[in-house]
Image: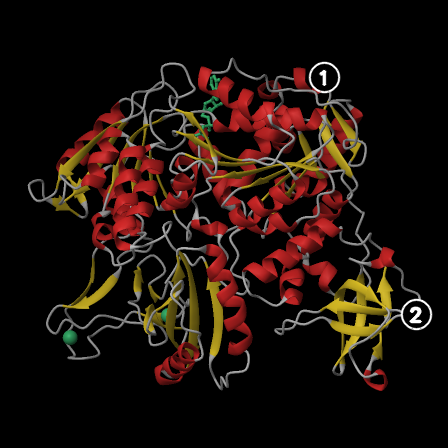
């Protein structure tokens, strides 16, 4: 009787064997329900064999093969195997991590097809003057506006407009302003009709499209290094269009869920009849499963998503784009610690398709690979919009120009001028909350989190102290818990405090704060974005959410507060990140022909990082950093892995690591360091420590880890949780 070898979501790196009478090789990649201990669980059939390694009386039978969806294609199974090997992580967990939740369940999978239709404007609908519709039909107006903006919408989006929107939609269909199209109909084999017109390309864009286009059917890793506003999206669009004509799929990965709607709208406007799915953690399980299936069936031609989308089955995959490739959110920081960018490169190679890494500030790893010839580099070195220039960057020396509530006089003056000209400005401070610390002025007590090695952040608007690492909340103390003094006060600045200062200084300005707190509600960020686009906002105050990828045509001034702290961080990647972040924020201004200005408040105006920022010289700064990294023996000149351990007591974690180091083989090609407490030494009540391993050869490191990992599994580890992080970004 055939035996199946099944990947299950358990933390041991083996396949489990079961008897399965009616199985064939066709079922490889299929889901199967099997008994595990006293439970029933779902797994993936990885192999079908005739002989078992388990003694025959012990082997159990599978309950049933779940055939309601086609098996996972071999290509994706290979990808799971690669991740399991490369990240030294159990295959079952890797595979299950890659599946949408609905498919992990043992319940039969029934896709809810109650939303099969999509809606779009007819030609008559397009011709309607929305402003001529009576103001009493507000819902109708909003519905039409939404349709015009998004090209195609589904009933879920309709309902989100208003409770009355579905009946308004019916009326619009009766009027023949809107038509109903079946989701299936919009998909296959309809040639792409381009609604948004492609602009006349810049020379750089033309060259990039030409070079990649000429090798569109072979694996190459392209680094598209384009300054902010250089029109990278247009390059993506034209290459996608090439792929659509070949009937092939494109996977587009973006770092952040907030970026998907804007990009989705751009893609839909260009390819209104092409089926596009967007996959990210903000979807409900049903939506995610549906998108996943449309991709698996090859119907969805454009798959837009955050890092988890890299595990979507794509039978006709022809191109992968990783936008803002330097962003650390491509790396998952828990469980399977994979880098979606690196997995994407492996995947592209495996299917022999090109992969494009796009960025204005590439990661040093990618940049180094490009200048050393392993990747192909293309540059877009001017802004795409006619007359748009890179902003002028100036430093305000805060040793001379003292700040009040975080703001210096020259910055206030610039904001004032901007307001008078009716242009938008952005004040960037990468710290949410009101103030980062609550201090007692008489004994220097500071409020700290009892579960983490961190300070509690003052959130004045919520009247709370909040830990940004574990979410712990406390009420404000009235007196110092140490000395009883009443003189306790917030110290330093966060977004809320800067917002308050600006409101006081510019009472008539329309000011909006944008950080994780103010955008938490679903749809909030979309509404704010719209307000920005439609010029209902004068001053934006916010964190790095604002820095990424957005196009704000009316923005001409950027003020940067409090960035000095990262100049002297112990993290060797801190300056790379700070530079990328500041280049990104600075890049939001002057994008549509308004001359832009960036003012950086700093006590170190002569620092090389600010110099490079003033010159907009990524290359010079990257070269300097690379030289430093080479001298210090840091990535990209070495490959690293981190053995991370956490336990309620630090001794336990350190003990485990010491024993782990003791069983590691001694060799010249792999360096193994002493265990040390982690930078964040306590988190959520767990003490944390780690051990660094590195080598100048990735291959040697990999071989070493494989051997070591099997030994680690045999170490007693009571109360210690440990994991291996390959290519770690956080220490
Ligand atoms: P990036 O992602 O490189 O920062 P975007 O792709 O957001 O830049 O493009 C910036 C702006 O330039 C967008 O408003 C886009 O519509 C516009 N744009 C892109 N290419 C062209 C072009 N060839 N001519 C005119 N405008 C363009
Ligand atoms: Zn005190
Ligand atoms: Zn905490």
Q: Could you say where residue 594 lies in the image, as x and y percent from the top left? A: 33, 20
Closer to the camera in the image, 71 or 662? 662
Which of the marked residues, 1 or 2, is nearer the chain's N terminus?
2
Looking at the rendering, the quadrant in which ligand 3 lies is: bottom left
Q: Residues within 10 Å of mark 1 (few under 14, many from 20)?
A: few
Q: Could you say where residue 365 lies in the image, as x and y percent from the top left? A: 40, 45
Q: Residue at x 40, y 25 (%)?
A: 553
Horizontal side of residue 457 vs 416, given as left or right = right
Q: Residues within 10 Å of mark 2 (few under 14, many from 20)?
A: few
What's the colour scheme? secondary structure
Residue 407 in the image: above or below residue 109: above
Mark sitting on residue 262: none
Quadrant occupied by the N terminus: bottom right
Q: Could you say where residue 726 lies in the image, as x and y percent from the top left? A: 47, 60
Closer to the camera in the image, 132 or 455? 455
Q: Is residue 164 something one can see in this rendering? A: no
Label 1 beta carbon within 8 A of ligand 1: no
Say how many tags the image has: 2
Label 2 beta carbon within 8 A of ligand 3: no
Q: Residue at x 83, y 79 (%)?
A: 60
**SS state under label 2:** loop
Residue hosting label 2: 21
**SS state under label 1:** helix
Residue 605 in the image: above or below residue 144: below
Horizontal side of residue 518 vs 419, given as left or right = right
Residue hosting label 1: 123
Q: Quadrant of residue 400?
A: top left
Q: Is residue 495 something one can see in this rendering? A: yes
């Amino acid at each position: 009787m055939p035996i199946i070898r099944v990947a299950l979501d358990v933390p041991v790196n083996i396949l489990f064997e079961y008897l399965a009478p009616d199985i064939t090789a066709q079922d490889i990649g299929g889901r199967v329900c099997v008994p595990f201990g006293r439970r029933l669980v779902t797994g993936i059939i990885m192999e079908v064999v005739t002989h078992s390694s388990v003694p025959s009386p012990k082997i159990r039978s599978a309950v049933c093969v779940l055939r309601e969806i086609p098996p996972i294609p071999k290509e994706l199974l290979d990808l799971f195997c690669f991740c399991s090997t490369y990240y030294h992580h159990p295959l079952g967990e890797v595979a299950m991590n890659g599946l949408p939740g609905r498919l992990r369940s043992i319940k039969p999978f029934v896709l809810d097809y109650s939303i099969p239709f999509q809606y779009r404007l007819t030609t008559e609908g397009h011709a309607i003057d929305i402003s001529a519709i009576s103001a009493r039909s507000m819902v109708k107006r909003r519905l039409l506006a939404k349709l015009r903006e998004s090209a195609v919408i589904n009933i879920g989006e309709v309902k989100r407009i208003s409770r009355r929107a579905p009946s308004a939609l019916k009326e619009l269909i009766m009027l023949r302003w809107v038509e109903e199209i079946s989701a299936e109909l919009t998909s296959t084999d309809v040639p792409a009709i381009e609604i948004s017109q492609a602009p006349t390309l810049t020379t750089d864009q033309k060259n990039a499209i030409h070079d990649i286009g000429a090798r569109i059917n072979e694996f190459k890793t392209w680094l598209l290094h384009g300054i902010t506003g250089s029109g990278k999206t247009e390059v993506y669009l034209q290459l996608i269009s090439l792929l659509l004509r070949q009937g092939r799929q494109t996977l587009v990965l973006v770092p952040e869920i907030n970026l998907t709607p804007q990009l989705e709208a751009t893609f839909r406007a260009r390819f209104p009849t092409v089926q596009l799915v967007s996959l990210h953690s903000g979807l409900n399980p049903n939506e995610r499963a549906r998108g996943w299936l449309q991709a698996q069936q090859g119907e969805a031609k454009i798959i837009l998503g955050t890092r988890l989308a890299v595990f979507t089955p794509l039978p006709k995959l022809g191109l992968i784009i990783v936008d803002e490739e330097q962003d650390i959110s491509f790396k998952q920081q828990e469980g399977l610690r994979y880098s979606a960018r690196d997995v994407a490169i492996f995947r592209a190679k495996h299917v022999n398709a090109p992969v494009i890494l796009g960025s204005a500030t590439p990661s040093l790893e990618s940049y180094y690979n490009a200048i050393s010839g392993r990747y192909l580099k293309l540059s877009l070195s001017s802004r795409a919009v006619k007359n748009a220039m890179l902003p002028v960057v100036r430093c305000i020396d805060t040793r001379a120009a003292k700040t009040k509530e975080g703001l210096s006089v020259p910055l206030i003056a610039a904001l004032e001028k901007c307001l008078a000209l009716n242009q938008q400005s952005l004040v960037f401070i990468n710290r949410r909350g009101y103030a980062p610390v609550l201090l007692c002025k008489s004994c220097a007590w500071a409020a700290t989190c009892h579960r983490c090695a961190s300070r509690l952040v003052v959130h004045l608007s919520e009247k709370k102290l909040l830990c940004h690492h574990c979410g712990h909340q406390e009420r404000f103390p009235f007196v110092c818990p140490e000395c009883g003094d009443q003189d306790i006060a917030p110290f330093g600045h966060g977004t809320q405090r800067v917002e308050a200062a600006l409101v006081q200084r510019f009472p008539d300005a329309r000011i909006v704060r944008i950080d994780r707190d103010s955008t938490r509600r679903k749809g909030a960020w979309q509404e704010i974005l719209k307000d920005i686009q439609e010029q209902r906002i004068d001053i934006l105050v916010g964190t790095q959410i604002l820095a990424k990828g957005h196009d704000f045509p009316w923005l001409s001034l950027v003020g940067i507060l409090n960035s000095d702290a990262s100049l002297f961080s112990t993290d060797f990647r801190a300056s790379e990140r700070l530079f990328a972040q500041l280049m990104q924020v600075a890049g939001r201004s002057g994008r549509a022909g308004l001359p832009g200005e960036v003012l950086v408040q700093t006590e170190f105006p002569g620092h090389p990082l600010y110099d490079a920022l003033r010159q907009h010289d990524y290359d010079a700064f990257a070269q300097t950093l690379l030289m430093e990294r080479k001298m210090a023996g840091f990535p990209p000149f070495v490959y690293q892995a981190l053995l991370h351990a956490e336990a309620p007591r630090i001794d336990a974690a350190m003990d485990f690591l010491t024993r782990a180091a003791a069983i590691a083989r001694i060799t010249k090609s792999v360096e193994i360091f002493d265990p040390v407490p982690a930078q964040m030494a306590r988190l959520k009540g767990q003490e944390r420590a780690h051990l660094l391993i590195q080598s100048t050869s990735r291959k040697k490191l990999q071989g070493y880890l494989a051997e070591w990992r099997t030994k680690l599994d045999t170490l007693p580890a009571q109360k210690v949780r440990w994991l291996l992080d390959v290519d770690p970004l956080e220490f």
